[in-house]
Image (cartoon, rainbow, N blue to C red):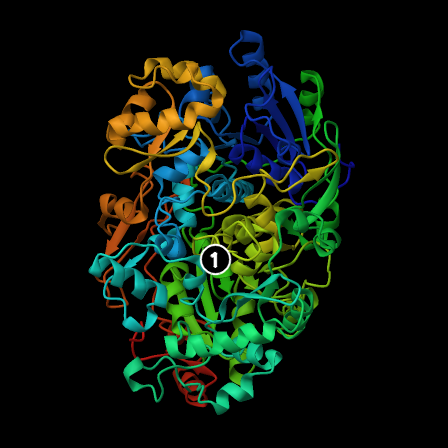
Amino acid sequence: MRKSFSNLPLTGVKVVDFGQYIAGPAVAMSLGDLGATVVHIDPPDGPMWDSPANAALNRNKVIVNLDLKTPDGLERAKTLCAEADIIVENFRPGKLTALGIDFAAMREERPELITISVPGFASNDEERRELRAYESIVAASSGVFTDMGLNRVLMGLNPSFSPLPLASAYASQIAASATVLALQSRQVTGLGDQIEVPLAAAVMEGLCYNSIKVDNMPERYLTQREVEIERRRIEGLPMNVAYDDLQELLDPFFRSYMCKDGRMFYVVCPSHKNHARRCLEVLGIYDELVADGLTSEEDTYKPWSEWKHDTSLGVYPMPKFWADKIAARMKEVFMTRTSHEWKKMFGRGLIPGAPQRWLQEWVHDEYAETSGLMIDVWDPVYGDMTQPGPVVWMEESGEEALQPEPRRWVAFDEALGLLKAHRTEVPTPSDKTTREGWLSGVRVLDLCNVIAGPHSASYLARFGAEVIKLDPSVPMYDSWNTVIYGMSQMRGKRSVLADITSHHGRRVFEDLVKSVDVIVWNAPDNQIKKMGLDADSLRKLNPGALFCKLDCFSGVRRGTRTDYIGYDDLVQATTGIMLRFGGAMDRPEEHAHVGTIDVMCGFGGALGVAAALYQKYRFGRIGRGRTSLSSNSGLLQIPFAFDYKGRGLFSEPTGPEANGYDALTRFYSTASGRYILLSAYESDLPLFREVEGLEDLPDQPEEDRAAYLATAFQALPASDWVEKLNAADIGAAICENLDALRARNSREADGTPGTENGSYSFSIYTDHPSGHEVTQLDPYAVRPARAMVFAVEPSEKFGTSTRAILRELGYADEAIEVMIKSGDVALSWSAEYLPS
């Protein structure tokens, strides 16, 4: 195993991993990548999911095969658990307890123990908790496959299948961060916790930017696609827009363009004052378009009715006239160079853009290899193997994280010895320890923008952290990006506006840095020193401050693309997600959900913060946590993001016509017109004998199963079939949509976080600070038994707390007024919360 001395933050932490499939093993993989000693327990016949992905999911682990249904196997498992700091499992609620591994009883004997359960549905969800909650079942039940983005709705592809394990990926990041947050809290209180993170709740949190509802949204924020969907619904027209026609409804700064080499190049330049202009400049058409009448408003936060012109460069969405005009010229210019040339020109010009590539190319991409985003690991089964690198790491120990130990099968005694080699050291719990959040008393400065970074800091707030969000006194992004996204990622924060490049603003920034425990920042490395956030500069301001950085392309090591700026969509393009979803180089599609990777990266940022806090409390080291959108894409594609000699085709379901994996796991239409998702294995075929109307399925030749099932399912409504199949313990679910889930599971906001409300929970804010009624998902995926989870406050208007925070920093009212008049600090960006 690892060398005796390690700088990895979780060195000495002992984990027993009962996980199967993806979510549970991925939690323990993250802990192992951060230095924990992990013993993984498999059944006697091996893992329940036989996949090469297990080589990555079980790296840095020793594996013991035990039969928990035998007295000897159960006793050995309990013996291993008695040595653990953390125990991980992801079975149906109560299953492990029924086998004799009772977390509640274990914590009675050892209050310092931390347990993490990742079931498919919540243990307090009486309707669904006993279902066979495979990945696709959770996705279908949670609205992942229905109304899957504006493109698929307009094309009439509904439901629409994706093989990305969204639920497991989100849940593993949330659960890993929650586990280490509990661990760092234990170093202070001496008390562990019993935590549950349901897959369904986790995927809903990942889709929180999709499920939010804002009543009376101003017209200026409606895209051409949304207008077209509404027109077709009102006029009763079919959703049958062809792919090529759909492209002409996209914003010119948010779409793909064909290049000279036959590759598509994805541009993501909306919503920012400089990105769209730089894009047109590098293409050589900026001056031409300005001469043709393209305008830029000085203040886009004014009501639309007060604008001097009908559009402004750098604002999303653009009106159709200008969108068509700009896109036509961009199409012409992109064809003059190769996608590789454009990649370098955009990257070096600080313009978000990237070529479309297949996953197979990304796995072997030179930058991915040199940066540590893809690493080589020798596996005892597959030999030399390329796997995703660590998702989260610390700057000071990143190199060590790039050298994981391959999975290794050992006897029970050796596994026990590895756990016994480390001594658990925690303080003695005090009788006066109160029930509070894991981060109560921790103060966080959020310097981030868009989704990933701000979402990370907002997530910390639910555990009791005090979060201050610092933004420029004059915004760089338009209100679609700041205010619309901010309704989700500003929750639980106080907002201060200051120009940190100005005299007064810089003083405010430095005073804030001196006052906090943690700083979260999402920008490339080349901006860190410029802003005084490099380790040496920060140490002079606040020696004890911890720093966590999220960005687009970083790995552990620097490379050609480390400092390229970018967003979620660019990583989808770079790592093959868009080409898989679209199915071909000439028809890439962004994966349908807002912030597909962004939100997951935010949870990864929280894991980086938690690891930094733990190693500070445990070892006295001040560290710098790191993660990136690109590193998270490896986890999001873990079932197929690997290569080895003899690997078969990269053949996971691709393209708009994909409806599942095979006849036993795919969509089927029913008599009610609703679709169900059937999810079964070959081993489940005998179970169909017990389902009236499907008794003959086991007798059908494999090539005839789909036709047999498609015909049979037309006999009854979807709800009847799901009831019958679930009664036979066969995985099946109705393909729900987010609007219906929100409507059925909403309540007036009541000051609770929703953790008691089963697998789905929304709050209605009739008095939202925006002046609009807002319905949004609760902060409910993490359910500790001991620590508190807080119902975070709705997002305040940007700048609301500027004056109060300056007073807390010691500024007199007279000085604050001088700073406001100078423009170095501001109380607001606009008269309206949501500019109309």
**Which of the 4 image quarters holds residue 689?**
top left
Q: Is residue 784 visible?
A: no
**Which of the 4 image quarters holds residue 266?**
bottom right
Residue at image position (46%, 57%) is 455
Residue 776: image location, x then y, percent: 31, 54
In the image, residue 168 above or below residue 89: below
Q: Which residue is mark 1?
A: 457
Q: The disc labelled 1 sits on which kind of residue?
A: Ala
In the image, residue 380 above or below residue 683: below
Secondary structure beneath dot 1 equals helix
Residue 160: image location, x then y, percent: 40, 45
In the image, residue 12 above or below residue 620: above
Crowding at mark 1 (Cα within 10 Å: few <14, some 14-19, many 20+): many
Report how many numbered discs are placed on residues in the image: 1
Quick one: 538 or 665, which is closer to the camera? 665
Residue furthest out toward the bottom: 291
Question: Is the C terminus in the top left, top right, bottom left or bottom right quadrant?
Answer: bottom left
Judge from the rendering whether residue 646 lies leftward or rightward of residue 497; answer left or right.
right
Question: Is the N terminus in the top left, top right, bottom left or bottom right quadrant?
Answer: top right
Residue 291: image location, x then y, percent: 49, 91
Residue at image position (73%, 33%) is 646
Residue 753: image location, x then y, percent: 33, 47
**Which of the 4 image quarters holds residue 404?**
top right
